[in-house]
Each structure stands twice: as structure tokens, then as C-alpha cells.
Image (spheres, coloured by chain):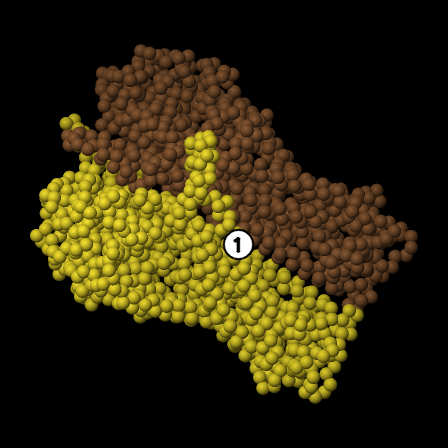
Chain colours: A yellow, B brown
Amino acid sequence: MAAPGLRDIPLLPGSPRRLSSRTVARGSQGPKHGQQYLKVPGHRAPGQRDNSSLHPSQVSRRESSRDRSVINNYLDANEPPSSEARLSRMHFHDNQRKVDYVLAYHYRKRGAHLGHGSPGHSLAVISNGETGKERHGGGPGDVELGPLDALEEERREQRDEFEHNLMAAGLELEKDLESKSQGSVFVRIHAPWQVLAREAEFLKIKVPTKKMYEIKAGGSIAKKFSAILQTLSSPLQPRVPEHSNNRMKNLSYPFSREKMYLYNIQEKDTFFDNATRSRIVHEILKRTACSRANNTMGINSLIANNIYEAAYPLHDGEYDSPGDDMNDRKLLYQEWARYGVFYKFQPIDLIRKYFGEKIGLYFAWLGLYTSFLIPSSVIGVIVFLYGCATIEEDIPSKEMCDHQNAFTMCPLCDKSCDYWNLSSACGTARASHLFDNPATVFFSIFMALWATMFLENWKRLQMRLGYFWDLTGIEEEEERSQEHSRPEYETKVREKLLKESGKSAVQKLEANSPEDDEDDEDKLTWKDRFPGYLMNFASILFMIALTFSIVFGVIVYRITTAAALSLNKATRSNVRVTVTATAVIINLVVILILDEIYGAVAKWLTKIEVPKTEQTFEERLILKAFLLKFVNAYSPIFYVAFFKGRFVGRPGSYVYVFDGYRMEECAPGGCLMELCIQLSIIMLGKQLIQNNIFEIGVPKLKKLFRKLKDETEPGESDPDHSKRPEQWDLDHSLEPYTGLTPEYMEMIIQFGFVTLFVASFPLAPVFALLNNVIEVRLDAKKFVTELRRPDAVRTKDIGIWFDILSGIGKFSVIINAFVIAVTSDFIPRLVYQYSYSHNGTLHGFVNHTLSFFNVSQLKEGTQPENSQFDQEVQFCRFKDYREPPWAPNPYEFSKQYWSVLSARLAFVIIFQNLVMFLSVLVDWMIPDIPTDISDQIKKEKSLLVDFFLKEEHEKVKLADEPTQRSQGGGDRSRRSRAASSAPSGRSQPGSIASSGSQHTNV
Amino acid sequence: MAAPGLRDIPLLPGSPRRLSSRTVARGSQGPKHGQQYLKVPGHRAPGQRDNSSLHPSQVSRRESSRDRSVINNYLDANEPPSSEARLSRMHFHDNQRKVDYVLAYHYRKRGAHLGHGSPGHSLAVISNGETGKERHGGGPGDVELGPLDALEEERREQRDEFEHNLMAAGLELEKDLESKSQGSVFVRIHAPWQVLAREAEFLKIKVPTKKMYEIKAGGSIAKKFSAILQTLSSPLQPRVPEHSNNRMKNLSYPFSREKMYLYNIQEKDTFFDNATRSRIVHEILKRTACSRANNTMGINSLIANNIYEAAYPLHDGEYDSPGDDMNDRKLLYQEWARYGVFYKFQPIDLIRKYFGEKIGLYFAWLGLYTSFLIPSSVIGVIVFLYGCATIEEDIPSKEMCDHQNAFTMCPLCDKSCDYWNLSSACGTARASHLFDNPATVFFSIFMALWATMFLENWKRLQMRLGYFWDLTGIEEEEERSQEHSRPEYETKVREKLLKESGKSAVQKLEANSPEDDEDDEDKLTWKDRFPGYLMNFASILFMIALTFSIVFGVIVYRITTAAALSLNKATRSNVRVTVTATAVIINLVVILILDEIYGAVAKWLTKIEVPKTEQTFEERLILKAFLLKFVNAYSPIFYVAFFKGRFVGRPGSYVYVFDGYRMEECAPGGCLMELCIQLSIIMLGKQLIQNNIFEIGVPKLKKLFRKLKDETEPGESDPDHSKRPEQWDLDHSLEPYTGLTPEYMEMIIQFGFVTLFVASFPLAPVFALLNNVIEVRLDAKKFVTELRRPDAVRTKDIGIWFDILSGIGKFSVIINAFVIAVTSDFIPRLVYQYSYSHNGTLHGFVNHTLSFFNVSQLKEGTQPENSQFDQEVQFCRFKDYREPPWAPNPYEFSKQYWSVLSARLAFVIIFQNLVMFLSVLVDWMIPDIPTDISDQIKKEKSLLVDFFLKEEHEKVKLADEPTQRSQGGGDRSRRSRAASSAPSGRSQPGSIASSGSQHTNV
């Protein structure tokens, strides 16, 4: 047993002294594993004073300002930390140091027989890395290891080296002893103050300075107005501390150790909040290399090679703990993540504080989108009611339903269908008026502008949040975070280097300049990625073709079933309704299945492309997934809107599909009606099924599955699980956070439904609103209760999603223009009213739109067999603008056709350019940065300069104190003048309530 | 005479001792003016050691690191600085301190009789402010002053106080004694090192650090390609030092006095180049307040109240000095501002170094625009030649010129005009084919994409320049520079306060909270600006109406002269050519005159709006001026393109204007021909006249006028002008720099000509190119030789001009679509070819487009009187799609009309959406930031972190040196580990040629 030397860390004697047999057998040359005292050879960081003789409590409080040393948390041997003494389960065993990050890994002892692991109190705590096994490279005398054990050994060594590097970077680690044969171990990481300070300086984290200043609430009217608004909406405000004082704001400045006096550091431990602390540790984890694992950088690649199983920050505590000790998570749960509070605003600041900016921005966006849906759903309902109210005054539908002017229509299908009377389609005609009336035109112009207004307001909200969350000027940070290339990318580059070096070992020698090695060897050029790109292109084309073919398949299904059903009498009556309904349901099911497939395929495609950084990976994945899901969700709707009933041909020369089936036609009421049914079923179906089943059902199933897995896991069941599990155990059992893409994707597709085809379905916003109100709370519950705490990522905006949103906004203008011009009857009615109608009313419109067809010219074998029509049918009518049979060139497109067509096209041009001009106007009128915020930013800038100067003068004064006192004479005048030479000559603006210089204990 | 006390500055004894009589009479209480020794009461800045006993040469080199004191530039009494000894005329009289800025003012002594000023060597130099007259407030014993003298006295006191504040801010001043009765005095300002350092830190000016790193020229192919390009274009490269080494770049970091060790400061005087020094002084000038002039801030308001006449930085010397001493200005003149070097690239870096970023960006933009015009003019010429080549194969024009199928056309005017044969218009028909052929459609698609490519490439060039000029992250600076509100704005606010305080003195007392004073009193709300806005709106509307009425006036002129000329035989033949030509010339003249008027009106309108800051003033001015000039330049062209010949009516029911004149028709060849003439004359005319006369002629005139004024100016002629005039005298006689708006405006309007109507005039790019090649050198000459040196303003982009450009780009897509669809015959020919022609060729097209008119139905008195036509005319033809007279509804629009119309509208929709989609694609494909630049920026970031860390470690090591040596033992290991714990674990990338840490003499 080596004498307790200068650098030994006494192992905690608390564990019962039954050393497992395995340890004795170990080779003798290295220090025995599981010894009482741990040798820590040479891990003393530079300038670190040996304080092992001090009592732990003294250690952390001792003023260790200058040295960035690794504090050696030696636990007093004779004071066993019983579990009851453990105040909170968020700290190390010494109850002082907060756990900022947890690395979990699964270990399996060598030759560990699968029997029950050796019982024993596993609380033996080894701190600062279990360096007992510090053997570099397998010594000759090693016990022969099986292949699995060799891998385990390799992993253990990589872990050791990685943890060693972490400690070198100044972090403090603590983990339980691997007492059982196998199980998971949690490495707790704590970042001491110097490390936090150093990293905060590098990451330029903005922290509040001493200076508070009052936010002016703008002009007097604006102030009164916001005061009223405040009182009005107070019941809607969540009772969350941050919300109360939004009148005062701290001046914030990137942290820097030289300017420590600027900051108001009462308590070193709580100066940086938990999210920032875990972000700093995460940055270090991402940066620390592990030379043994061929120099891969950072924790992500280690997790990728599953050296570690998971790395996650800790939740702030239980969210449903009975007591009244409030922690952020619990507050979030009560004020936000419950369906009961659906009417309340969201506590965005608290969400950001707890989950970080990226998730904060998502919920802010979702909140704004939902609140913006309110006005549009109100107007949508009004338009719908207008439709209902004016159903009676709609002359064309009345003419249709009027039995006297019985229009005998040509048969809908060959042979089996008979001539039919137009008035039989009276129901659909009246129903189609609900959606096909002038109000829909106004509503689609409104929705196009609504989309622009929404995007504008989001830009402003994003700017306001950016200002209050001190995100201005975080470009550098974003760039730096992009630098870490993905593990897969690095492996691919290494493969390439190996291949290259093998091939061109000779070639390299001749390479003239040494810098060449930097050349394009060490990064993937598009030549390497070419196969990936090709594969991408091909598979995307294939999938789009797949979607189109499925849509075509459904059409064929519709045609064949319609033909089949209309064969026998019984089912003939409501052929159209059954066919359409079943077809739409098939479409819906197909869309849901393909959605999942396309999600997975998009991920796979992006993988083979091997993008360099995490951010490009995410962007490319989103673009691909969006393209596929967009096509998948909307192609059936596009078909009905623009293509259905266009290729029917005319009686006498119908267009045939599959030798015998005529192309399908729209319902007599027009295609808009059908479009509306299709749209509503797909939208509601998608929302109900995708939300309820996928988002709630599947996670619950997974949770159940994990619980089962945990129960049955051998050796896992630790007898002393009886005592309350640690926070990291609880978090470990939660689902890992997998990013926001699915959430955003769902909302964007819904945004498409709400804007693209709103002309045909004005109630879309209402359904979207209902869904979103639940969606907000559903996602909130998921984040607070079911997911591990995500890393607090700082972003200034929602990234590529904004471009997609504005793309959809622009695209919706053209689509709405075409829907109104082509699908709906709005333009033909207008043209008829102003150029063809005798008395300027719509009387005679129906007749005007129906052309004649001389029944005798029907092709052989397509006449209706036993037509029930009483009198002999000579001419049957069909909906088109054709020359009458008696005209010189019969059945050609008539003049009306061309004039209506040019009216439609003219409408599209005017609508598109008008709406685009209006959106540009709206975009230009509403400044991206809210004026009060830009004033505040400017004011903050000038305050910063003054504050900076004042502090500097104080510092200069402090420095000059000794010299000046000896000079005596006019000090005061000098100091006053020094202040006067401050760059901004203007006297200090009165409004700064300088909070007095609380003396910091620097 | 007060004994030469501690703080007196001996007046330079060089001046002959004839004290002007005036000085003696001065009141006795203050120190005598013009005394040998100047008393400088209490201007010693804090901590400033008295160094009056030192020799001047010692003064400036003495180590005065810490005190920001005003160095008292005491000139050795017994060493008279004879003018020959003056090394360069860019320094103070001590030849040490460089003149960074000059304030010029005109003084008039009290009661100075208009006779010849007292001769005498005016080289008596007073330094640090002529504080002889330091009397606060007119003492009781003052001599009674005339009104003019009181104003002069007031101005003198404000000048003194301002200069006093400048000195308090640490600047050093030097000016000549006001020896003559009146004349202009030049206050030279020099910024010592501490002031430069302090301000550089506040303005966060990026300066190169010690670290140089090699710019990787991208992949191997890219490197070879750029090498070839380099050699190829070497004759085109200007021989300017900067251009040579663009392989290495300095890592730059905002200047900070704490991190002085980072920078490579060999020589304190030349560390900051002239432009930066003058910019720093300009910032101080803008910031220094002058309490006496009711606390106005900065030099601009003083100039506005003409306390000072001008404030400008100095040119670097003579540009045409015979010797071979090279200075930047001369280099610029030789390598850039000469017509001889028109084929060479512009030395952008030198331009930026000399004139600052704003002007550098203008010339970079102009250069890119001109080089982008090359490909489009080449293709324009090809399209034009294609037109010429295919003139023979154009079937319709051949049919027109073919005498056999003589189409008798209806008379062009009532009574006097006869029927005429279509073949007589053969010339114009063939000519119109030159511009009206399928190639023009392709060319306008190309030009729409060309505009997007140009804007994309400008964004990239701007980013590249931003990177090489270290402009990344200058947002704060821009915001701060916006803070200074304009003098007019402040006066307006003060008036409002006076008015308010008068009115609401009582009301204010009741105002509850004290902060209210900050309320909307001290800034102009839109309520105050409402009259201004109203005036704006009204006058803009009026002016647009004015332009339209002038265009209409020209139309009436055309109609009346055409009618008048066609009356008598002689002039009838080429009526159309004379009328069009004269009309276009009138248009041109009107446009040029209105251009100037609108420029002035726009300025006046923006003035009454009283915008807050200089930047908003400029933006609003630009928007107004652009709107007016756009309407002015393009309305005649819009008329010809879209409205001419549309309201003619048809024979038998013509549209009459002014009771008797028929609306004018396009030439038989179609309107495109006429549009092309109109466009070419206006564009060339505008360019030739505006460029040559206005830009060259007028400045020359002004220069002449100034010279004359100088000659005749009494008292100005200084006998000793014989000796070489100082640099500030020369600069003073140059034109002041009035901003870039007129230059940009001219180019933007030309950009409009090149993109908007290119479909009708493919040669526009060629003429634009020729004009711009001259324009670049013309502007260069103006800036180098005719203008005072502008302030070096830092901007990252060309501001609102980019938005206007992209606006024109988008607008040109729609206009081109309409020009092709409506003005040109392209669509009718297409429709005829594919749906009406029997054999798919254009044969019979002319006949197809001419409708018949039964002559008998001509209105009474409009038949041609004595028609020469041999056989009796029954039907005459006219160009329109009408039902024939024998049809059921004669002369109504025929089916062809509607089908051609819908074809035209369809083309517009397809063209617009296709081109927009392609531009978005181009925009998306070309990344805004060139990839090699974004790599460099990332690399620079990581290098900065490493460099920052390495230097810090060195600093820490220096600081720890004493402590560590005592500890002995493993220092080296600690230092190596210290380096290893640098955040980026990766070893230093090989490629940084660290230039070795030259020891700075900190």
C-alpha cells in the first residue's frame, strides 16, 4: 500500500470492504484498482497549489483567483456522506458543487458472468477520474482479453483520456465506482468559477452589468395604451417572476475578466444561470479532443462511436414534487405546460431561461402564429356565413334547381349512364355557392396580405426578443459553433486521406510547396460528394414520381369504382359522394404513411451527402423533407384544383383512359366544391391523426417500452434503488431531445393549408387555430416532462424556416390567383354580367355556360342503352363554351370561351401584381426593427460608452491614487475636468437610475 | 509684461514687431492681445507634466503614455521657422506634427475700413488657441460695437470656446494670426497619439495585428485558374503597391489600449493612415459641443450657423507636382484619374485608403456595373445583327412591300389624307423587323437574369471588400454615427420646446412623473411633421401631374403638326419622320430641364420634413428624387410603349381629341419601331448632354468664376502669396464635396434604360458601356483634382441604392413581359402560325391582321376629298381584329382578337413567373458570401482566438515571471501544458507563417 503521498486521493472508505475477487487478479505493475488511495500522477494543472490537506469545505471557498488549476476535491475520509445528508440531488456529494452536465456510459466488466452483480453499496465515489488504471498501451503481462473485452477496454481507455483532458481544461468530475458487473455510470461535471469566467470571455457571453436603466414606454399615448392593455390582459399573464418588471433593464456587456468591476457578482455560483453553465460545459466538451480515438474532436463523435451513451444537462428538479419548493421546471409545468392554462400567454422569458434561445424562439413563433390565426379565422367564419346568407340570392343556383328550365345533360359515362336533368344536382350547386362567392376573392387577398403581415410581425418580435435576450451581435458565436465538423464527416475525410495517402504517397513527395497538405485533401470537395448528390437527385425524382403515380392511382380508382357502381341501379344514386369520400380517405392514409417514409428517406439522403457541419446537415435535411412532404400533402389538392375536369374532351370526342374509361369530370356545382371537401378532409385528418396518435400515443408507448426494458435488464436492479433515485437517473430514463424539425415541419405544412387554398376553404384558419391551441400545450408538456433537458443553443432567428415561410407566402399569391381565376366560377359570372347579360344581372348565366350537342353524333355504343327519358332527346347540354352544332365550325371553342379565358388571365395578372405590390408596401412600411427597440438599442449603446468611461475613470483614478496624492493641489478640478473630457460632452441623461455602485467582492 | 510663468506660451517672435494699433486700445483687465507670451490659464489636462522647458523636438517623442494631456507645443523662440525650412506643407510649423484636419473661417476685424489690409508678415503663429481674449461675457468697459461687429464678436467667442473644447479633448491646434483687416484663417488640427488611441478604442477601429496569414487560393484547379487569370490581366492591373501582395493578409482586431502588445506599432505617427486620422478628428469635431451656441453639438451645426466656413481634411499633396516624390494623390492621378488608362482595372484598395469606404464602394460598384455591361452589349449587338441578317427572310415585311397584293389602307386623317397603299410603308416595316424578332424575346429574358446576376455578384464583391477592408461587424459604428442629429432638426426641436414651454409652463408642473420631460417634447413626433408630410404628398402629386401633362402636351403637338403638315402637299411625304423627331427632341429638352428642377424640389421637400439624422435625410432625399426623375425620364417612353395607338377607335367611329383631331396611331411597322427611336434619342441625348455639359462644363465654369472672385476679392491678395501657397490654401480653393447622390442617380436611371425597355432597343447596353467607361475616369478626375478631400466615411454597403436597383430589376421583368406581349408583334405572329395559318408559315399574316371597312360607312365630311386612287375604293383595310362588315355583328372584336389577347396575357404570366423563378434560383444558388471568403473569415476567427490566447499567456507569463521563478521546479512543463490547455485543442494549423513576435516598444 503506497504511503498517502502528496498527490493521493483517499478513496471514500464508506463502501463495505468486500473487494470483488476480480481486482486481486490484476497485473501487479500498475497501482491496484479499487485501492484505498488513488494516485493522481502529474494531473496537477499549472500553478495549482496542493490543498489536499485542507478540509473540503475550505477548498471551494478558498480564494483561488489566479490559477486555473484543477481543484482536487478530496473528501474527508472520516465523514461518510450518508444519503440523507444529501441536500439536493443536483450537487456533488459535497453538496457544494452544482452538477452542470452529465455523461452517461454503459460498462461491462471483463468476463462479467451474466449472474447477479456483486451486491454492495456502490456509493464509493472516485473523483477526478479513476486513474487507477493509468497504463499507457497494453503491457506484455496482460491477461488475454476476449474480442468484446478488448473493445470494452479500448473504450475505457478512451474515456479515461477524455476525462483526463476535461480535467486538464479545468472541469471537475465525479462518478460512482463501477461496482456491479455491468450497468450505467453517470459522470457528473462541475465547472468552477475560473473555467466559467474564461469560457464566458471566449464565447463573449453577454451578462448584465451593474447599470440598470428604465425602458421608456414611448410617447404619452403609447404609454397610456400599453397601460390599459396591461391591466386588461393581466388575467392572461402567467404568474411568472420575469414578467413583472419589464420596465427596468440591465445594461449587458460581453463578460471579460479584465472588466470584472463592471459586473454585479454577488454569488459566484449563481451568477451564471444553469442554462449558461451547461452551455459553457457543452462547449468545452465539444472542443476537447481525445487523441486515442484518432484525434476525434468532442463529445458528439465519442457518442457516435458509443464510447459514451449520452451527454445531457440536468433538469432543475422534479416537476411534480408535492412540496412547495419551487424550481423553474415546476413553475413551467404549472404556468405553461398544462391544458388548463390554454388561454394564457406563454412565459417566453422563463422558457428561454430554462431551454435556451432556440426553443424559446420556437414557442414565441408558435404563439405569434396562433394569435395571428384569430383574426383570420374570425374573418373566415364571416365569409362563410356571408356565403350561407346569400345562398338564397344566388341566381345561377336557383336557375339550376328550377325544374321548369330543365336542361337535359349529356350522360356522365358511356352506355350505362343515362341523360340526366341538371336540377338533380341542385344540392351541390347551392353548396358550392357557400365557397364560390365574391367574398372568397376578398378573403384570399386578405390572406395573402395576412401572410406578409405575419412574417413582418415575426421579424419585429424576433428583434424585440433579440434585444431583451441580449442576442445582438452574436454572429461570431454562431460562426464558431458551426466550426465543429460532424463526426461522420471526419471519418469520411479520414477514409479519403487513407485512400489518397495509399495511392499518392509517391505523388505527395513531389508536391512542391509544403502548404499543399492544407490543400483539398483535408476537406470533401464536390467531386467526393458527387455520388451522394447523384443519389439524392435520383431518389427525390423517384419519390415525387411515386407521389404523382399514387395520385393517378387514386384517380383511376375513382373512375373505375364510379363506373362499376353506376352499373347497378342500387348504388347509382349517390355514386359521386361515396367515390369522392373513399378516394379522399385513401389519399389521407397514403399521405400519412408517405410522410413518415419521406422523413426517414430525407434523413438517409442527407447522411450520404455527408455535409460538413451540424447546421448545414440540418438545413439540407429540412429542405429535402419539406420538398417531399409538400409534394406529398398537396399534389392531390393541386390535381383537383387545376387539372380535374380539364381533359374531359367534349361529347362525341371524349378523352379515354385505359381503353374505355372516360376522364373524370368535376361535379356540376364546379370543381371548387370538390376542392373544398378534399382540402378539409386531408387537413383535419392529418391534424387529428398526426397530432393525437403520433405525438401523444407513440411517446407514451416508447415510455412504456423503456420501463419494461429497464425492469427486465439483468443486473441493473440495484438493491439500494430503494433510496430516492438521483436526478441524473431520472433524466436518463427520459427521451433524448431530437431537435425541433418535426414540430416546425408540421406547422409549416399547416401554414400552407391556411394560405395556399384559402380561396376554396375559408374555414381552414379556424381549424388551424383549434389545433394550434392544443399543439402549444402538447409540445410544452413534451419538453417539460418527457424529454431530457436540451442543450441551450443560442440563435438569433428561426433560420431556414423563415425563408420557407416567406417562400410559401409568395407562392400562395399565385396559387390563390389561379384558384379564383380557374377553379371558381367567379370570372365567368363577371364576364357574363358585364358583356353578355342583357339586363346586367346573372339571369340566363347557366344557359350561357351550357353548349349544345347533337345526340346523334354520339359515338357508336356510347349512347345510353335504355334511357328513361320520356320524350326523345335530340340535343343534350354540356358545360363548356363551344360553337353550337349548327354553326359553320361546330363544337370549336366559341368567342365566349376566348373572352372568358382572357378575362381569367387578366385577373391573374392584376391579382398577382396588385397583391405583390401591396405586400412590398406593407414590408416597407413596417420597419423590421420596432422603433422603440431601436431607440433603446441606441440609448443602450451610448449608456454603455458612458458607463464604460465612468468605470475606466474610476479604475484610472484607483491606479493613480497613490501618485496623485503626493502631488496635492488641484486634484478635484482635474477629476471634474477628466469627467468633462468624456467623449459625449452632453451631461448624463437624467433618466438613468444608476443603481449605485454596489461594491463587488472582486 | 507678466514674467514668463510656468504656463505661458511665448508668441513666435518671427513676426515683425508692428503691433496693429487696435490691440493697444483693448481693455486692460485681461492679458494684452498680441503679447509676446500667451497665458494659458488652466488648460493643462489632468496629470500633464509641464514640459515647456523642453526642446520641441523632445516634446513629441517624450514618453507621455498615461496622461491624456494637451501637449503644449511651445515653439523655440530663437529658431524662426523660415518658409524654406518647411519640409512639407502638410505639417505644423514645427515640421513634426501632421495636419489631420483644417477648419477655415472668414474674419472681419471690427471697423476694418475697406482699404488695403495692413501688410505684414502674417506668419505670427499662435498655438493652442488665441486665448488672449479670454473674457467671459462682455465686460462693462467694452467699446460700443456696430451690429455687424457684434455678430463677428459673437462668432469669435463661439470659435474660441469651440477651439478651447477641442484642446480639452486633447487635440492640438495651430492657426495664423489675424493680421489683415479681413481674410480667411485656417485652423490646423493635429491629433496626438493618446487621443488617436483613445478614440480608436471607442470607435472600435480595426487595425492590423502582428499576425499575418496566407490566404489560401482555394482548391488546386481554382489556384491554377486564378494564376492564369493573373498573368493574363497583368497589363490591365494598375501599378499600385497594394495590388501586388494579395496572398498575405493581416489579422485585424479592434484597437484597444489594454492589448497594445497585439499590434505592430513601429512608428506612432504612421500607424494610423491619413484617412483614419482625419476620420478620428472628424468624430471628435462632430462630438464637441459649444455651450455658447445654445449647446449645439458638433462642427456641422457651427458651419450651418457659419461660425466656421468649412472643415475639411487635407489632400496628400500636389497631384501634378513635377518632381518624382510620389504621394497617394499623385499615384491615383497617374494610375486612375486619366482617360489614358481607361482600359485598366481600378485600384480600389488605394481609392478606399485615400477617400474612405463609401467612395471606394461607389467606384467598385461602378466598375462592376461597367464590366457587367460588356457581355450584355456583346449579346445585344449579336441580337441586332441577327435582326439585320434575317431581314430578308421576314415574310410579313416582304408581303407588305410586295406591290401586287396592294392593300388599300383607310386614310390616316380626315378629309385631307387619301387612301394609301400599304407597300408605301415598306421601309418602316422592314426596319421594325430589326427590333421586333424572336431574338428580342430571348434577349429580354437574358437581361432580366443579367440584372439578378449583377446584383448577386455585387453582394459578393461587397462582402469580399468588406472582408479585406475589415468592415465585418461595423454595425455599432454605423449606429453611433447616426446618432448625431442634424442642426436643422435641433433648431426645430428647440423652437418646439420654446413654444411648448411658453404654452404649457403651467401644464408641466402638474405632469406627474419627472421622467415626463424625456417624453415626446424633445423629439419631433409625426404630429409636428404632419404639415411637412402633407406638403410633400401634394407637391409630389403635382409634379407627377406636371410630367404627365407635358407628355400629353407633346402628343397634342404631334397630332396638330401632323395634321398641319399633311395639309399642304410639299411636306406631306415625310410627315411622320419630322413629327416624331421634333417631338422626341422637345421631350428630351423637357426631361433635362425638369431633371434639374426636380432635384432642387426634392431637396426642398426633404428639408421641410426635417428628418432627424443625416442618414434619414439622405435616404428620403434619394427616394423622392428617384421617384420624380424616374417618372420624368420614362413617362414619354411608357406612353409610346403601351398607350400609343390603343385609343384610335376604328374607321367609322374614330376617337377624337380637341374636337377634330384623331388620336395618333403607331407607324404601320408597329409601335416597337417608334419606341426604339424614342428610347435611343432620350438615352443618348441625356447621356451626352448631362455628362458632358453638366458634369464637365459647369464645374469648369464654377472654377473660373471662383478664380475671378478670388482675384477681385479686396484685401485677400496677400503680397507674400508669391511664396508657395500652403496645402490648405490650395484645398480651400477647390469645390466642397457634396455627396454621391447625383452620381448614383445618373447611373440608376441609366440602369433603368438598360433593363426596362431592352426588348425594344437591344443596343442600349452598348451605349451605356461607352458612356460608363468615360464616366468612371470623369468621376475619378473630379474627385482627385477638383474636389476637396471628402471625409472618410465607413459603410458596409451602398445603402438604399441597392434596394432601388433590385426594385428596378423586379419591375423590369413585368415591363419587358408587357413590351413583348403588347407592343411587339411577336405573339400575334405566333398565334397565327400555330392556329390560323394553313401551312404553318407566316404567309398571309398581314392579310390576317387587316380588317375590312366599308368605305361608304365613313362619317360625313371625313372621306378623302380628291382621292388619286385610280379605281373606285369600296373597302379599305385597317390594322385590327374586327368582324368583317358582312358579318352578323360587324366591326365587333372578332374571335381572333380574343384568342390573340388571351395568348398575350398567357405569355405575360408565363414570362413573369418563369423569370422570377429563375432569378430566385440564381439568387439561391449563388451564396451571398463567397465560399473562400467565408472560410477565411472562419479561419481568421479561430486564428484570432489562438493569437489572443497566445498573447494572453505571454502576458500572464510575464506577470507571473517573478512569482514562478521563486517556486523553481517544472516551469517548462507548466508552460507547455498551459499552451496545451488552449481551448482549441488542435495543434496550430501549419499554414500560419507567424511573423515572429517583433517586440513592440510598448
Above/below status of A274 relative to B78:
below
Seen at 41% across and 27% down, the residue is B274
Q: Nearer the viewer, residue B999 or A293?
A: A293
Q: Nearer the viewer, residue A971 or A40?
A: A40
Image position, residue A548 (x, y; %): 56, 64
Q: Nearer the viewer, residue B1001 or B636?
A: B1001
Image position, residue A762 (x, y; %): 50, 69
Residue B303 located left or right of residue A133: right
Above/below status of B17 relative to B392:
above
- Quarter of the rendering containing residue A898: bottom right
Seen at 69% across and 47% down, the residue is B439
Label 1 packing within 10 angstroms: few (<14), some (14-19), many (20+): few
Seen at 42% across and 45% down, the residue is A495
Q: Is residue B460 visible?
A: yes
Seen at 86% across and 52% down, the residue is B406
Residue A651 located left or right of residue A73: right
Amino acid beneath label 1: Phe
Which chain is disc 1 placed on?
A
Pick out the residue farthest to the bottom: A870
SS class, disc 1: helix
Image position, residue B255 (x, y; %): 33, 33
Q: Nearer the viewer, residue B531 or B731?
A: B731
Q: Quadrant of the C terminus of chain A?
A: top left
Residue B143 located left or right of residue A80: right
Image position, residue A953 (x, y; %): 24, 36
| Residue bearing mark 1 | A537
